[in-house]
Image: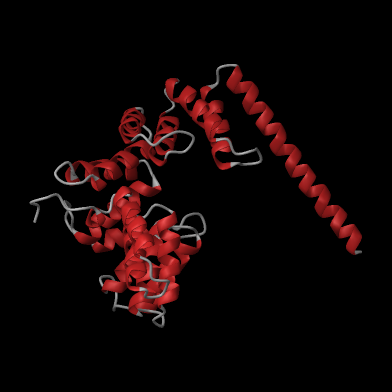
Amino acid sequence: MRSAVLCLVTLLLLGACSEDHEAIVQLRESCGDGDVSACFALGQRYRAGDHILRDFSEARRLFDTACDGRVGESCAALGVMELQGLGAKADSAQARALFENGCDLGAAAGCAQLGKLFYEMPEPQRDLATAAQLFIKACEGDDDLGCVSLGSLLATGTVVRKDVVRAAELFTSRCDDDTVMGCVGLGRLHLSGDIAAADDSVAADFFSRACRSDDAAGCLEMGRVYELGRGRPQDFQRAANNYYAACRRRNGEACFRISEMHRTGQGTYRSAETANDLRESACRYGYAEACPKREGAR
């Protein structure tokens, strides 16, 4: 009986693999015939390693081809790779140009990523009003990042009228089996008590759910949960582990937090060298507090 079950499972897996192989072959043929949407779809597979050997260089080439063919989503995807330095050295200026192109071509993802750039720019270049307009446009196009980012502005009343109810709606719609992007926002609302009586335990549940799905902000918040003992028993080692998880995903604040723990030896080993390296990473990832102050700056 057990052998029969194993044979059935094997046959099903082989069938699925065969279907994926055929799909990839078809995408290659269509892309070669000039179907730029197929080039974009094939690029997504190469970037993710989806039933094909992951190849960032090939993904970039395919995204570039589709972007030249006016596939806005492909411009945005290539922009993310430029920003993250996947397959080539990171180039934020080129990423911005690609996001602008993608947004102009109607890709909500391009508008959302461009809004994020404006939101995260250091002062005085930071432009929250433009970021808000781009998040609104992206959310109207049903982009997860755009809607969650808009929710964050609504929750705090940053350059838009504060609307906690609408923020909660946006976060809830992006905290389910398909995506956890809104879970951190929901957790923060529960932590502050803006949508109900403050409940640290419920907030921690939302942060944990996001972190388990590799969301950097979720891991950052779980680090705070354990460091402060809010919603979970205080545990500095777990705090350090969560900050590390977020730092590895390029969250600058998390890198700064774990650098401070290395400086003091709280929750991890004490090392000035490691602390300095992590602080440099925090600055490189855009966390201004970690950057060296200019001479004469207050």
Give coordinates of residue 90: x percent, y percent. Answer: 39, 37
Would you identify the image quadrant in which residue 124 lies?
Answer: top left
Would you identify the image quadrant in which residue 252 lies?
Answer: bottom left
Residue at 45 percent across and 31 percent down: it is: 74
- The quarter of the image holding the C terminus is bottom left
Residue at 41 percent across and 38 percent down: it is: 80
Residue at 45 percent across and 58 percent down: it is: 180
Give coordinates of residue 125: x percent, y percent. Answer: 17, 41
Would you identify the image quadrant in which residue 271 lies?
Answer: bottom left
Q: Is residue 134 above or below residue 290?
A: above
Q: 106 and 69: which one is in front?
A: 69
Give coordinates of residue 9: x percent, y percent. Answer: 81, 54
Image-based side of 289 in relation to 226, left or right = left
Model colouring: secondary structure
Can you see residue 238? yes
- Seen from this angle, which residue lies furthest bottom? 233
Q: How many marks?
A: 0
Can you see residue 169? no
Residue at 62 percent across and 41 percent down: it is: 50
Q: Is residue 134 above or below residue 72?
A: below
Give coordinates of residue 53: x percent, y percent. Answer: 64, 38
Q: Is residue 268 above or below residue 125?
A: below
Image-based side of 15 in relation to 244, left or right = right
Q: 235 and 10: which one is in front?
A: 235
Image-based side of 123 in relation to 181, left or right = left
- The quarter of the image holding the N terminus is bottom right
